[in-house]
Structures are given as structure tokens and as C-alpha cells.
Image (tube, rainbow, N blue to C red):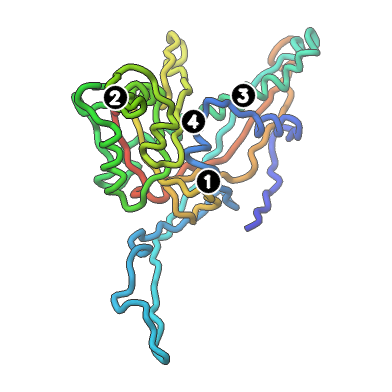
Amino acid sequence: MSVTYPTLPAPFITDVQHTAIAIAYKNPAFIAESVVPTVTVDAPTFTWNQFNQKDRFTLPAEGIEVSRRGLVPEVDFSAVEQSAVTKDYALDGAVPRRDQMAKPSMNALNRTTEQTAELRDLAREKRTSDMVFNTASYASGNSTTLSGTSQWSDKTNSDPILAMLTVMDSMLVRPNQLVLGHLVATQLRTHPKIVQAFNGTTGQYGQVPLAFIQELLEIDEIVVGRSVYNAANKGQSTNLTRLWGKHAALLYKNPITASTEDFTFAVSAQWGRGLAGRYFDEKKGAYGSDIVRVVESRKELVLANDCGYFFQNAIA
């Protein structure tokens, strides 16, 4: 479906160059797009269908064999229409004219656009981690909180591969993606049982490639969240915190997700293309300042909560 984006009135000049910078800039540590991919919607208020998943797995009671003049069995895929509204996210970055005049070769407007876009994406990363690593995002019975000897940081008693394989066998749809916080990934890669499986010996020390764990689980992708953010309130000392924490999630991600109608764990619905613009503020600095604004409208949605399993506190 083609989408026509309206021209929105705005109190600033939409800047093609800086919009391109804001859209293209990517921090390689961010994994939000890999875990909850973007799909487009044609209005800020939109609807989506929450399908009854068992309809996809239920055969007609009378079977599907049809006699020469018999009636063909009819199937019905039920759904509940849900509505949602994208939220607007925006940040301004001030660039004093004095700085631009003093060091014109630095192209401060471009640099500020990149830095502001990175903070916008960091906010999306946090929203995504807060949703994916949250028991409320999963169907009843599709999450567990580990503690004590069951945590994967207990190198003597825990068996993380067996725990995940057991969960995968119990799920309605087999997951194809494992999402890990960085510290969890390290504990898995150094776990004695996994090291022994990799070496084929009784050796307990070392660090195995993530690709080997992916092979053990027969899963398509392992994604590791390594980004950090400052959890301190304004005015407090810096408190850099790992954004993806000490958790893990097994998810089914449709490899060709393109809309809110697709069968997949979650999507990020985006209205508009996201843009950047600038305006002049004569009150900021002796020579005034150019203000660069980055904007996007999004709504993160869990579409199929039984297509994932969450391990809260996977490690101590």
C-alpha cells in the first residue's frame, strides 16, 4: 500500500539536508530496529487487527476432502480491531551563530543534527527495551523470573541451553530470535556447560562465539543490546546504566514484516518519514542561535504476545 505523507505546517524550515542526516544516522550499538522493526501507517490514529492465533492452527472438523459435488469447507479467521495513536517525539539542538562564525569548517549544524538524532534514537532504544523486557508484553505463562541457582550466572547448577530449548518446544510458534543484554551474553559465552560443548572436552574456561550458541539453539539470530544511558535525574551525578539489563527474550520475528497486519511479536508503527528542520532564535547568544529540530512519530506495539518468551533476571 502506497502512503502519501501530508505537508505539515511547522514553526521551522524543513531542511532536506539535515532530514537526511537525521534519518540516516545510526549508532551501531542500537538494536531497536532489529528487534522491533519499523512499519509505516498512513495516519497518526490507526487501527490494527489482533488475530485469534488458534485459527491459524485449527483444521475443519469435517476435514478438507471434497467429493465430486460436495461443498467446500469454509474457514473463518476472527480478529479484534484495535486502535492506536502514534506519539510525537522531538528534540532541539542549539547552535550559536558565534560558534559557526568562529569555526565554519566544523559544520556545527550537521554535527548537532547527528548528535540530536542519536539522542532521539536512544529514546527509542529505551522504549523498545522497556517493552520487550517486560512481563506485561507476554501471554500468560510465557515469562519466568529466574533466581538463585536457576540464574545463568550460577555456573554450577544452571543449564541455560536446556532451559531455552525446553521453552522453545513449549511455544505455539518456534522463536527465531534471541535478544540478550550484554552482561547476559557474556555469562552465556563463558558458561562451563556451553564451553564444554564447544571444546568437546571437560575444559570449563573460555569464551565461545555467539554463532555457536545460535547453532546449539537452531535459531536464526542472536541480538545483543550493548547501549547505555544516563539514568540519573537532571542535576545528579552521572549514572551510566546498561539499557538492556540482565534479561533475555526468545521472540518470533517475521522476516518480511511490512505492516501491523503481519504475524510477528512486535512492530514500531511510524507515521511520516521523520524529519529535521531549523529555525533562528535571536534570544540565544549575542548573535542568536540556529536551532536544529529532529522529529518522528511512532508507536511501539506488541502484535502477538504468545510469539515470545521472557526470562527476567536471567543473571544475578
Please give left or right for residue 246 compared with residue 91 in the image: left
Eyeballing the image, is 100 above or below 114?
above
Distance in Å between CA atoms under marks 2 and 3: 33 Å
Which residue in the protein does label 3 denote?
116
Measure the alpha-carbon separation of dots 4 and 2.
Answer: 21 Å
Q: State which quarter of the image contains the C terminus.
A: top left
Q: What's the distance in space between the residues labelled 1 and 3, CA to CA?
A: 21 Å
Q: Are marks 4 and 3 in contact (CB under 8 Å)?
A: no
- Alpha carbon separation for disc pair 1 and 2: 32 Å
Q: Residue at x 47, y 42 (%)?
A: 300
Name the quadrant containing residue 167. top left
What's the mark number on residue 315?
2
Residue at screen point 33% across, 61% down: 54
- Local packing at callout 1 (Cα closer than 10 Å; few below 14, some 14-19, many 20+) is many
Which residue is more in the foreground, 98 or 70? 70
For residue 316, say whether it is visible: no
Residue 76 on image: x %, y %: 39, 71
Q: Residue at x 41, y 57 (%)?
A: 50
Label 1 element class: strand
Q: Quadrant of residue 225?
A: top left
Q: Which residue is mark 4?
A: 125
How crowded pointer 4 is (Cα within 10 Å; few <14, some 14-19, many 20+) is rated as many
Asked if residue 15 shows in the view, the reply is: yes
Q: Earlier in the sequence, mark 2 or mark 3?
A: 3
